Amino acid sequence: MNELMDHIIEEHKQVVNKFLSQDNRTVIERMVNGIVQSFENGGKLLIFGNGGSAADAQHISAEFLNRFKMERPPLPAIALTTDSSTITAIGNDYSYDDSFLKQVQALANKNDVVLGISTSGNSENVIRALRYSFKKGVKTYGFGGNTGGKMPGLCDELLTVPTTTTARVQECHIIAAHLLCELVDERMFGSLR
C-alpha cells in the first residue's frame, strides 16, 4: 500500500511541476486579467463541465460568489451544471450535447468570460458551448488535459495538463482554479491593486 501511495504521490508531483511551467503561468496570468476586466465591466464568469469537471465548475463558482480567502464583495460566477430542470429539458427536447450551449446562448454577453472544463478536451457539450462563445466574441477559456483534445482554436486561453490520467488532470485543474480565485481577489481587492 505504501509503495502504491508513493507512486501516486510521485506521479502527482511530476505532473504538477510540468503543469506549472512558465507557459501555463503566463496563461493563468492572462486568465486572471480577463476575469478581472470582466468583473470590473459588469460581466460574469460562466463555468461548465461534466462529472468531476461539473463539480469543479460549482467549486469555482462558490469561491467567487462567497469568498476565497479574503473578505470581499461577492463576485458574479455561475456554474451551468447545477440546474437539473434546464439540463434535463435540453437533453430531452434537443440533445445532451446542447446542455451548455443553450445556456450560454441565453446568458453570455460580450463582457462575460466562459470557462469550459474537460479532462479529455472532447466533451461535445463543452465543445459546442465553447465554439459558440468563441464565434460570438465572448472571452472563452478552457481547462483541458493532455493536448486539449478539440479545445485548441476554440479558446482565447487554454490551460492543458500534460497527462492523460484523469485524476492528475483534475488535481491540476483545481490548483489552477485556486490560483485564479486568489489572484483575482488580490488584483481586485488586495495588495496587487
Image: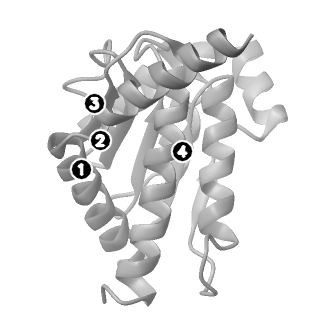
Mark 3 or mark 4: name the one nearer the start of the chain.
Answer: 3
Q: Is residue 51 left or right of residue 140?
A: right
Mark 4: amino acid: Ile
Cα separation, mark 3 vs mark 4, equals 25 Å
Kindly indicate whether the residue at mark 1 contacts the one at mark 2 (C-beta within 8 angstroms).
yes
Could you say whether the residue bearing mark 3 is in a helix, strand or loop? helix
Q: Is residue 95 visible?
A: no
Residue located beneath label 4 in the image: 47
Name the residue: 48% across, 26% down.
12
Q: Position of residue 68 (x, y in %)?
A: 61, 70
Give the left or right position of residue 84, taking residue 156 as reference.
Answer: right
Residue 102 occupies quadrant: top right
Q: Which residue is mark 2?
A: 20
Q: Which comes before the other along the chain, label 2 or label 1?
A: 2
Callout in the foreground (2, 4) = 2
Q: Earlier in the sequence, mark 4 or mark 1?
A: 1
- Residue 96: x %, y % from top left: 65, 15
* Quarter of the image with the N terminus in it: top right
Residue 96 placement, left or right of 161: right
Instruction: From the image, state whether disc 4 or disc 1 is nearer to you.
Output: 1
Which mark, residue 18?
3
- Using a 10 Å C-alpha cutoff, classify the residue at mark 1 as few (fewer than 14 neighbours), some (14 to 19) or many (20 or more): some
The Cα–Cα distance between marks 1 and 3, rounded to whole angstroms, is 11 Å
As shown in the figure, which amino acid type bears the numbered disc 3? Lys
Residue positioned 54% across, 29% down in the render: 170
Residue in the image at 55% along x and 25% along y: 9
Contact (Cβ within 8 Å) of mark 2 with mark 4: no
What quarter of the picture does the C terminus occupy?
bottom left
Is label 3 in contact with label 2 (beta carbons under 8 Å)? yes
Mark 3 or mark 4, whichever is nearer to me: 3
